[in-house]
């Protein structure tokens, strides 16, 4: 039988899940509806265009929504007051900040969140075009609501700097009880202190932010850039090394370290770039909280200020792909230039986008081209893609040059072990998995994989079962790991306990064909034949891979053969 395998071991999640409903962006958002194409069948009536625009907005097709709402305004100017809030949001989410600022609602009838967002968008547009005279007024905190109040507080000093306000530029942003403003306001003040030549005060702030046991990447990069510009490259290298000790594959920090070690210095960000960087943490916080649509709006504002902000383009691509806008997502990833530290990540996201779309040839071509440059992350991504396409030996071989030294990365050993095991190279695979477990003895993925494989091979059964139990104890909500435990009971001949455990696994992940397949087998062994047939039929409705589909069809026709007599346990 097929066993549970980690599909991807290293690739950072390239899709940000949008759970359930879209974030209610003030009064304009509604529950997600079916995706709508062009307004065919709606005619040229304002109402038809309005319905098409609403469906497009709910489906995440923001450019279409903006176009439909614009058509409503053109067909019926009297409807402008009703339509502007929706059109404003659609234009913003589509990245047309200029249009969003032009039609931004300002009437008293506008909802409070949208009125705050309107002020923020108009301020950003003014800062982007050099018309900053009114930005200070628009960014005043009075009347603003969360999360726009946070963004306004963070942007206000940058607007003051653009306007030449020497006093306002150095005022630390304040928003009582707002952790985002507390941290990133201090960072913004440090950057502006440096611009004003108040270097001691700038460094004091930078030290506060980059101290502690787990400093953030933004703070480390900002302080490191400051040190580089002060010709203190050795201190910058030490700062970067500290973060790389816990995050060794961080591309941005590795690039900064290489620059500092070479005696070069980061160019000080412009005012617009600094303002854009201020909006990124707000966007990331919103996305982490599940408010993806609002997070996308903030990323669009950041990119209006700085179209070259590569991390923002990556996040935009992730969000667009999660909406199913594959081509738009790929266009966002393609905005990252080859010289940027984020280029390898962008190429990896592009490759996986093609893999998910059923085009593994393009996916592997992109991954091979990226890995040809010698980048470690690109090689790891290629290995993952090769494994996803069942090119197991090649996947393992790609990792060989990356595994060396007395204590290599356990994740690399794990990945190579999986690939070698799937390629039928078990002695090598077992050595890798044992070595990985020795380096990280409590890692549930390792415990589960090695433990299950031993059980499947009828080896080290007592130890293996205990390892799988430990994995489940750490991840009791993982349907895949609970399935591994249930399937272990099945292979050991404890069919009643297998049924109980596999039922729990299917409750946790009801749409997984392999879990349903296992449960059907367990039902058959305890004599519940009708339920077994139901589970195998259900497998065929869940888009199983060819192997599981063939197994389910065979069992529906023939059932299972008699249970084998348990073999003698191998040491």
Image (spheres, grey):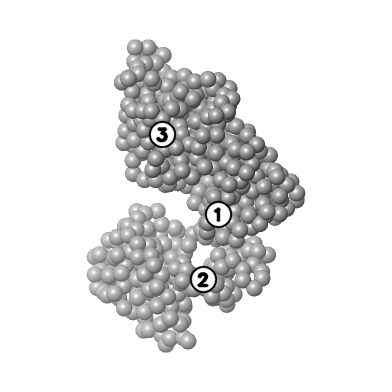
What is the CA distance from the residue labelled 2 to the residue labelled 3?
44 Å
Task: Give the residue drawn at x 43%, y 65%.
Answer: 4
For the N terminus, the image quarter is bottom left
- Quadrant hosting residue 2: bottom left
- Contact flag, marks 3 and 1 (Cβ < 8 Å): no
Pick the front one: 303 or 170: 170
- Image coords of residue 363 (percent x, y): 58, 49
**Label 3 crowding class (10 Å Cα cut-off): few <14, some 14-19, many 20+?**
many
Can you tell which of label 1 and label 2 is closer to the viewer?
A: 1
Q: Earlier in the sequence, mark 1 or mark 2?
A: 1
The mark found on residue 149 in the picture is: 3
Which element is circle 1 on? Answer: loop
Query: In this view, which residue lies farthest toward the right?
Result: 263
Q: Which residue is mark 1?
A: 211
Q: Which residue is mark 2?
A: 440
533 horizontally vs 445: left or right: left
- Image coords of residue 393 (percent x, y): 61, 65
What is the CA distance from the residue labelled 3 to the residue labelled 1?
28 Å
Task: Give the residue drawn at x 62%, y 51%.
Answer: 253
């Amino acid at each position: 039988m097929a066993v549970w395998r980690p599909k991807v071991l290293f690739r950072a999640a390239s899709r940000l899940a949008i759970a359930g409903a879209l974030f209610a962006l003030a009064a304009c958002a509604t529950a997600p509806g079916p995706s709508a194409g062009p307004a065919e069948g709606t005619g040229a009536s304002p109402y038809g265009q309005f319905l098409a625009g609403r469906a497009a907005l709910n489906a995440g097709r923001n450019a279409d929504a903006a176009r439909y709402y614009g058509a409503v305004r053109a067909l019926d100017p009297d409807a402008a007051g009703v339509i502007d809030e929706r059109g404003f949001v659609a234009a913003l989410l589509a990245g047309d900040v200029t249009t969003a600022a032009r039609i931004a609602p300002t009437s008293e009838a506008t909802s409070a969140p949208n009125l705050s967002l309107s002020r923020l968008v108009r301020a950003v547009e003014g800062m982007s075009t050099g018309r900053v005279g009114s930005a200070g007024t628009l960014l005043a905190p009075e009347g603003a609501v969360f999360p726009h109040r946070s963004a306004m507080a963070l942007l206000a000093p940058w607007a003051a700097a653009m306007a030449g306000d020497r006093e306002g530029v150095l005022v630390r942003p304040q928003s009582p009880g707002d952790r985002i403003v507390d941290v990133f306001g201090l960072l913004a003040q440090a950057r502006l202190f440096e611009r004003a030549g108040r270097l001691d005060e700038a460094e004091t702030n930078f030290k506060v932010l980059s101290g502690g046991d787990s400093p953030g990447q933004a703070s480390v990069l900002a302080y490191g850039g400051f040190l580089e510009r002060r010709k203190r490259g050795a201190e910058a290298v030490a700062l970067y090394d500290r973060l790389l000790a816990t995050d060794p594959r961080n591309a941005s920090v590795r690039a900064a370290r290489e620059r500092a070690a070479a005696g070069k210095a980061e160019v000080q960000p412009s005012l617009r770039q600094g303002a854009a960087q201020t909006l990124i943490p707000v966007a990331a916080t919103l996305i982490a909280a599940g408010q993806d649509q609002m997070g996308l709006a903030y990323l669009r504002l950041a990119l209006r200020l700085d179209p070259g902000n590569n991390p923002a383009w990556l996040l935009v691509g992730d969000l667009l792909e999660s909406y199913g806008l594959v081509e738009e997502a790929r266009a966002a990833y393609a905005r990252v230039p080859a010289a940027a530290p984020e280029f390898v990540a962008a190429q990896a996201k592009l490759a996986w986008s093609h893999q998910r779309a059923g085009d593994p040839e393009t996916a592997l071509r992109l991954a091979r081209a990226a890995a040809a440059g010698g980048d470690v992350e690109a090689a790891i991504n290629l290995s993952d893609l090769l494994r996803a396409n069942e090119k197991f030996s090649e996947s393992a071989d790609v990792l060989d040059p990356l595994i060396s030294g007395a204590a290599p990365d356990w994740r690399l050993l794990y990945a190579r072990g999986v690939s070698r095991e799937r390629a039928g190279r078990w002695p090598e695979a077992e050595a890798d998995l044992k070595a990985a477990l020795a380096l990280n003895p409590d890692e549930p993925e390792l415990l589960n994989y090695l433990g299950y494989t031993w059980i499947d091979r009828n080896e080290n059964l007592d130890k293996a079962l205990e390892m799988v139990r430990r994995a489940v104890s750490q991840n009791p909500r993982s349907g895949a790991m609970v399935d591994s435990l249930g399937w272990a009971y099945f292979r050991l001949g404890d069919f009643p306990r297998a049924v109980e455990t596999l039922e729990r696994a299917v409750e946790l992940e009801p749409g997984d064909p392999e879990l349903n397949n296992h449960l059907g087998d367990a039902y058959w062994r305890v004599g519940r034949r009708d339920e077994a047939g139901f589970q195998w039929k259900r497998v065929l409705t869940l888009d199983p891979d060819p192997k599981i589909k063939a197994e389910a069809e065979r069992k529906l026709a023939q059932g299972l053969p008699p249970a084998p007599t348990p073999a003698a346990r191998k040491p």
